Image (cartoon, rainbow, N blue to C red):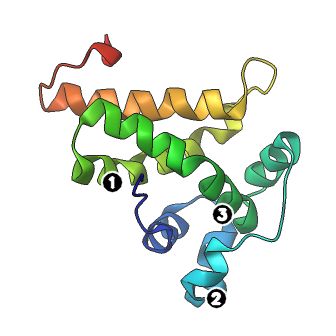
Amino acid sequence: MIFVPNVFHWHKILFGIGPCDMFTTKEDNYPIHKIMKQSVQYSESELLIALKLCKREAFEYFYDLYAPVLYGMVLKITKEEKTAQSLMLDVFSELLREIKNYDPGSQTMLCWALVIARIVACEHNNKVNKVNPICD
């Protein structure tokens, strides 16, 4: 079973540093069970539009959909659970910053997110001088 760190803590951090007004709403105080149970479903094109508009529900859906896969990629590269867990904040921060540059015509959103997760994990490995063939 893959452990994915608690999203509520990341929401607090990410929503405090994001470029969108929605990051500072009073909704930050709602309980974790409301975050983890998504009632909204998005197609990939709808998700992209909603993410570019900084919709909180879209980010939550995006996180719930992709975090387990991205965490698996980061863990495979770093080979350390605590490191992989802490790097997930960097991964999602980078994804939010780069969403404006995502081109749906070139690759799926999952492929794009995996590339960014790989880059973040490999940059970390390079900083700590760890060798991993996935990063070469």
| Residue at horizontal 50 percent and vertical 31 percent from the top | 116
Q: Name the residue beneath numbered marker 3.
A: 60
**Circle 3 or circle 2, nearest the eye:** 3
Residue at figure coordinates x 66%, y 40% from the top left: 99
Tag 3: Cα neighbours inside 10 Å, few (<14), some, or many (≥20)? Answer: some
Foreground residue among 98 and 6 = 6
Residue at the (80%, 49%) spot, across then down: 47
Structural distance between the alpha carbons of marks 2 and 1 = 27 Å
Query: Which of label 2 and label 1 is nearer to you?
Result: 1
| Furthest-top residue in this view | 136
Q: Earlier in the sequence, mark 2 or mark 1?
A: 2
Three-letter amino acid code of the residue under disc 1: Gln
Q: Is disc 2 surrounded by few (<14), some (14 to 19) or many (20+) residues within 10 Å? A: few
Q: Residue furthest front?
A: 1
Quarter of the image where one finds residue 106: top right
- Which structural element holds mark 3? helix
Residue 118 relative to residue 58: left or right: left
Q: Which residue is mark 2?
A: 26
Relative height, residue 93 to residue 31 (above, below): above
Q: Quadrant of the C terminus?
A: top left
Question: Mark 1 = which residue?
Answer: 85
> In the image, is residue 135 above or below residue 62?
above
Work out whether mark 3 precedes mark 2 in sequence or the reverse, and give the earlier one.
2
State the CA–CA distance, disc 1 to disc 3: 17 Å
Q: Residue at x 81, y 71 (%)?
A: 39
Q: Secondary structure at mark 2?
A: helix
Amino acid bearing label 3: Glu
| Mark 2 residue type | Lys
